[in-house]
Amino acid sequence: MKLFISIIFAAISLAGMAQDYSFITYSNSQGLPQSQVQCITQDDNGYLWVGTLGGLAKFNGKTFTTFPLENGLFNNRISCLQHIKNTIWVGHEGGITEITDDKAQTYSLGDNDRTVSVTDFILYQGKIVVSTEGSGLYIISNKRITKVTLRNEDASTCRDLEIINNQLYIGTRDGLYFTNDLTNFKRVEAFKDRSISGIALTKNNIFISTFFKGLFRSDFKLSKFDSIPVQATDLYIGSINSDASSQLWLVSPEGVIRMSAELKQLNLDESKGLPVNAINCSFQDNEGNMWFGSDGKGLIRFANQNLQMYSTKTGMPSDLILSGKKLNSKTYLFGSYDKGAFKMNLNGTCEKIPIPATTVWDIDYFNGNAWFATDIGVFSWDMKSEPKSYTFDKAVGPYRVVRPFRNKLIVAGEEQIGYIENGVLHEYTKFKFNLNKNGNIRDIAFYFSSILVATSKGLYEINPVKNKQTLLKSFKASISSIEIDNENRVWIGTENGLMIFDGINYKTISYSSKSGARFINFIHRVDKHIFVGTNDGLYVFENVEGSQVLVKHIGTNNGLINLESNINSAMFEDGNFWFGTSDGLAKLHIGNENNSFTDFPPKLNIARVLVNYKELSPAELLNGLHLTYSKNNLIIDLDGISMEDPESVTFQYWIEGESDKWSPPTLNPTIILSNLDAGDYILRIRAISGTKKVSEIQSLPITITPPFWRTWWFYIIVFVLIALGIRYYFRLQIKRERERNYKINLENKSRLLALEQQSLNASMNRHFIFNSLNSIQYFINTQDRISANRYLTNFAKLIRKNLDSAAEGDNVVTLQQELERLELYLSLEAMRFKDRFTYEIRNQNIDTEQVNVPAMLLQPFVENSIIHGILPDETKKGEILVIIKAIGDQLEICIDDNGIGIDFSLNKKAKFKGDHKSQGMEITSKRIDLIRQMWNKDYELIGPFQMTNPDRSIKGTRVLIKIPYENLEMNE
């Protein structure tokens, strides 16, 4: 054993340990025209413009779009780029291209300067000043280009332009020149005879780089220059840039030098992960990303300046780091999954620690000793003597956690939990865990006076003082980690998502649609920030007033080599957050203020619009889309520009006028709208980053004109046509109805005439005439000349009145005339039948001269009463009563007799066979029906019907004729 320990104590030094930075390259496979990148700039829409020796391209974070020669590019050999007031200025060999809204205008440097390269552009005094490599300056104003020649050949080799103190400074091969009028140029004598490669401005200083003569610093007075040491005194510095944090970036054929504001230098080359040493240019975009143009490896993005990776490639013993702890100001302890524990010094040396275990799950520092939870037990080490080991009785599985709590060191195995006090491991025997019942222990956290225990099956609370164990919640997915935030909420990470327990409720936190993001490996609190390690990288949340906000996602686009983090492998020390991944140890510098988490909303652009598969120009979109109903199939391609994490950008749209809510987020950057109904719409579009930052909303008005059959004028035409059609139809129907009515009226008139003739005949039938003449003869034979004379006179009057009525145009007479004729008829019949009956005509205040009625209307009913009602009964004297009265709005004519009644009369008629057939009543009934039809007169004939006495004996017969006043013909 001693020999084994002594062998372990023989420290294995792993010299030359370094760290890798992550860089992402973009080349021909993403559409870059050529791999030699000379210059980079960015426009207001967020696109990067990349100039190569084989063409110009626009980059949206994923793919490049080449700007072709056919669009007016001067040539494909690009030497410099600048974005000035919505315009991209492109420098070439021998010329210049001005690009505005994808439209190009070119300027030639002339035949003598066709091989001269443009090196820089700047806006000065309202003019574009152009520097060249060997032909001095050019000035572009009002679309015209003029040349400005400096005093000697070396000064004509201009490499950089900057405005300092309202003066234009030019870095040349002959030193530093300045002008304030673009006519007179002076040299800064303190900086003569130096071949300048670039000028960079920071908040307080001016830095000037040179070819082979180093880097210099000056104040804004430019009266004195200090030399700044770099990695080599004769370093070829190709160019220099400053970023938003006043860091300097120097590029050369040997790599990149990053110089902090405190002048601390970081050399980036192939040994630090840079894809190639030969770098031509550097550029910082509006999100803070650094980009490099390489000589042969395309466009390079520095994935994350604050993230460093340590692995076996850089000298670490293992790539699978599970735990870590700062031992002292100079040493860190790390535990691995497969190589045990080791320590790392600040000088970059790793040394094996004599812990006889392969897997180290947790490390902590307690009471002057380092403690290790391993696969075979718990070990303490004082860094001097042999490690001490501790195990539970009947221990099962590895030991997961060692963590100080209230002057004790809590120790958790897979099924047991205890504490170390005074060098002795004590087990909490009251607290039982096993794999089958409540799961094996995965993590613990201290919650007020209790200990929360996360197992593979649930969350438990144990109280060592009360010896009480409580199941808080069972989980289907195994819990991997728990943590308490600054608001005493419990964060619970499972293999299927993240939850927060506030002491009452459990809330599921949704932050990504990726399945790997739901597999939680660790949760670690740093002040108000919560770091969550997943199989989709690192997610950082910030607690803000009781809620949690996702502020950052660190993935492969942000420098991680592998997205899968290791379980409970995180620690925070000295402003650095360390965590293990499947491909090494990551160190993320966040500072002690924890305020370095910045994220930007994506820039949203409408890249292309196709209408019925025909692309529209940007000018056609300025005032929105005006489309016909037959050409309203839209395809809209979007660019959601997030240079740091372009793959996480999602898109939403909302068609105002058709819907009232946003569409679900989608990674698809294409919107397809088919067969929109006619109307006015506004298409609202937005892009959302992986951390839920929302872009500005783009709005595109869309007007779909309706087909002609859905226009207002077509509706009016159709309405008019329908109205005309309806009018024609009704007129035709009216015409037909009139024709039909005319025909019916003709028929009715013919029938009425026939009925009137029949009525006349009935009134003057041969029996009546014969009997009347017999009566006259009788009176003459009996020498009753008075009766004969009276009878003959009345008979003559009756005949005349009947003939007069027949001669009336409408066969209409006044009620007075009708009553006079009835009076004549009754008087004749009373004389003929020798006073067998009496009669009375009662007029109850009716103006009979003002009322017109059909002629010969009443006589048939009276005749029927006499012949069939009164005469058959010889036992009593008959009575006929005609009453004319007004009842309500009706004129009622009532004809009563006291004859034998209807039933007896009908029976008698059936037995009697004679040559006289009375048709007067039937004819009159038909006349009334025809009058009702022809004249629309609401006549009503009731009866004849039999009347009875209270003792049910026959009283007589009654006929009622009712005529509403509105149907009466009134004489004016």
Image: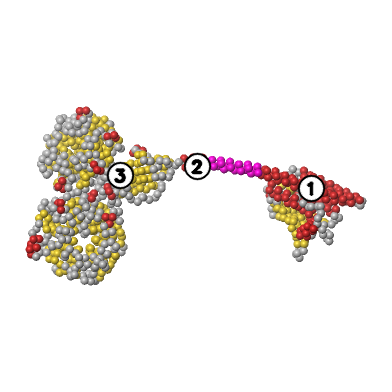
Q: On the image, numbered disc 2 is attached to which residue?
A: 715
At 30% from the left and 46% from the top, the residue drawn is 640
Q: CA distance from mark 2 to mark 1?
A: 65 Å
Q: Principal SS element in the magenta part?
A: helix
User: Residue 761 — which label?
Assistant: 1
Q: Amino acid at mark 1?
A: Asn
Q: Which type of secondary structure does the marked residue at label 1 adopt?
A: helix
Q: Position of residue 511 (x, y in %)?
A: 29, 55
Residue 638 left/right relative to 703: left
Q: Nearer the viewer, mark 2 or mark 1?
A: 1
Q: Amino acid at mark 2?
A: Tyr
The residues colored magenta run: 720-740
- Whether the residues at callouts 2 and 1 have beta carbons within 8 Å, the answer is no
Q: CA distance from mark 3 to mark 2?
A: 43 Å
At 35% from the left and 41% from the top, the residue drawn is 609
Q: Nearer the viewer, residue 306 or 636?
A: 636
Count the labels in the image: 3
Q: Position of residue 592 (x, y in %)?
A: 19, 54
In the displayed structure, 764 sits above or below 363; it is above
User: Residue 29 — which label?
Assistant: none
Q: Which type of secondary structure does the marked residue at label 2 adopt?
A: helix
Find out whether residue 730 is within the magenta segment.
yes
First-in-chain label (3 vs 2): 3
In the displayed structure, 591 sits above or below 75; it is below
Q: Amino acid at mark 3?
A: Asp
Q: On the image, numbered disc 3 is attached to which residue?
A: 639
Packing grade of label 1 (10 A; few <14, some 14-19, many >=20) is some
First-in-chain label (1 vs 3): 3
Find out whether residue 960 is within the magenta segment.
no
Packing grade of label 2 (10 A; few <14, some 14-19, many >=20) is few
Residue 912 left/right relative to 607: right
